[in-house]
Image (spheres, grey):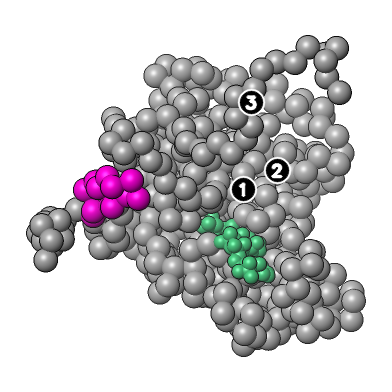
Amino acid sequence: MSENAARKLVSNNAVLYLPDGQTIELPVITGSENEKAIDISKLRSQTGHITMDPGYGNTGSCQSKITFLNGEKGILRYRGIPIEQLAGKARFTEVAYLIIYGKLPNQQELDAFRDSLNHHALLHEDMKHFFSSFSGQAHPMAILSAMVASLSGYYGEASEVEGIDDPDMNAARLISKIRTLAAFSYKKSIGQPFIYPKDSLSYCANFLRMMFAVPARDYEPDPVVVEALNLLLILHADHEQNCSTATVRTVASSHASLFASISAGILALWGPLHGGANQKVIEMLERIRADGGDITKYIEMAKDKNSGFRLMGFGHRVYKNFDPRATVIKNACDKVLDKLGIHDPVLDLAKQMEEVAVSDDYFVERKLYPNVDFYSGIIYRAIGIPANMFTVMFALGRLPGWIGQWKELMDDPTHRITRPRQIYQGQTAVDYVPIEKRT
Ligand code: SDX
């Protein structure tokens, strides 16, 4: 056995043998759930090589203590607690506290957190006028991102993270005000007057009242709807280094404000390949239903690369088994619609589509299963949320995760500005050609 191979057996390092004869030993990091990562932070300085991993499917950006997921086994835990337990027992405000501060709050801590959310529920009165400046066609996600960025004009020093008055206070401001911003953008879109928050209501009930109450009559949120919303917000609360969370961390790494980082995360979430998929799923199912409900036709289109059609709500970069959130939401669909006395033919269509797809070789070979977005829109629709607000609802749920990940990065004294490398494949050196000599 060569000396190198023997050393490899002894050390916990990985050994990389390069075509130009160099070798380098690289430390291996082992996570608390026994995940392994090769630390390449010295690779370029010692060998002149970088790695290439478009989409970062094989690349870790950080070590985190917030969320663990196992895509092969369909496991998802927030601070070690399975989401199935949290979804069935916790309130969203408890889960938000858990994700941001690392522990479930005791009663005193939860009361103080809820008081802080109530204290920060109102917007600065000037901000109300911003809504009248948006076009009637503006998507609620565009409005939400712009309004969150605008909060930095009212709270804390916009560009100086060191000067920010209080990250905990700004976290509470965001978690509370995002409800008000979302509800106000909905009221603006339907031409109804804004309904102000009411401290005596729970987080979800307060939001539903701001969305659906009108000054002319009393409004009491339906407990079934409150519980359904509580469940959906918990299931969306964090998901380790997904596209929008990676965006929040990237913007935070430049020391832009929390509001700027969250505003950027909202825009990343808006994409139809990410959180925007929940709106696209309902639009897809409605299109199939309007086209006679021919599921096979659309499954075949989804398998045909030239069709330009994707089965929205299916597939996931990490889950190569069922997305545990989709399983919980699918079960909740039946219960919520039954309790509300609603029969939605689109739910039947979704279940039929899942049944056909998960037994089709194309989807089985590629391990494509329903993800969190496949069934969520059916519940949102049943509780009265319009489709163009579905991704806003995703953002409401994901906000504690974004804030928790932002805090974890800012609390890490070793954090560095995000700045990936590249391999240049363009024109090699040439001289400038005066315009009279150009063809
Ligand atoms: C979310 O990352 C997170 O954690 C995200 C999220 C979170 O909580 O933050 O879980 C939330 O964003 C869920 C995903 C929502 N998006 C959608 O439902 C859009 C539809 N799904 C896809 O576009 C796709 O599956 C992604 C974007 C979710 C994942 O893309 P990947 O990992 O880059 O996979 P890929 O596009 O390389 O696909 C691999 C293969 C390809 O076929 P081949 O080239 O190997 O032949 O699977 C095919 C793809 O064509 N494929 C699909 C498909 N998704 C993947 N084919 C048809 N329909 C689909 N939906």
Q: Amino acid at mark 1?
A: Leu
Graded by Cα atoms within 10 Å as few (under 14), some (14 to 19) or many (20 or more), the crowding at tag 2 reads: many
Position of residue 382 measured from the top left corner of the image (x, y, whole percent): 72, 67
420 is within the stretch colored magenta: no
Q: Which image quadrant is residue 425 in?
A: top right
The residue singled out by tag 1 in the image is 269
Q: Is mark 1 within 8 Å of ligand 1?
A: yes
Q: Examine the rendering and report whether any part of residue 98 can be seen.
A: no
- Do residues under tags 1 and 2 come within 8 Å of each other at their CB atoms? yes
Q: Bounds of the magenta span? A: 14-25
- Of the residues under marks 3 and 2, which one precedes in the sequence? 2
Reading the image, the residue beneath label 2 is 141
> How much space separates mark 3 and mark 2, taking CA atoms?
14 Å
**Above/below status of 49 relative to 366:** above
Nearer to me, 141 or 188: 141
Q: Quadrant of residue 128?
A: top right
- Neighbour class for label 3 at 10 Å: few (<14), some, many (≥20)? some
**Looking at this view, is 207 or 297 the one in front?**
297
SS class, disc 2 = helix
| Residue neighbourhood size for the residue with mark 1, other residues' Cα within 10 Å, grouped as few (<14), some (14–19), many (≥20) | many
- Find out whether residue 18 is within the magenta segment: yes
> Could you tell which of marks 1 and 2 lies nearer the N-terminus?
2
Q: Secondary structure at mark 1?
A: helix
Mark seen at residue 150: 3
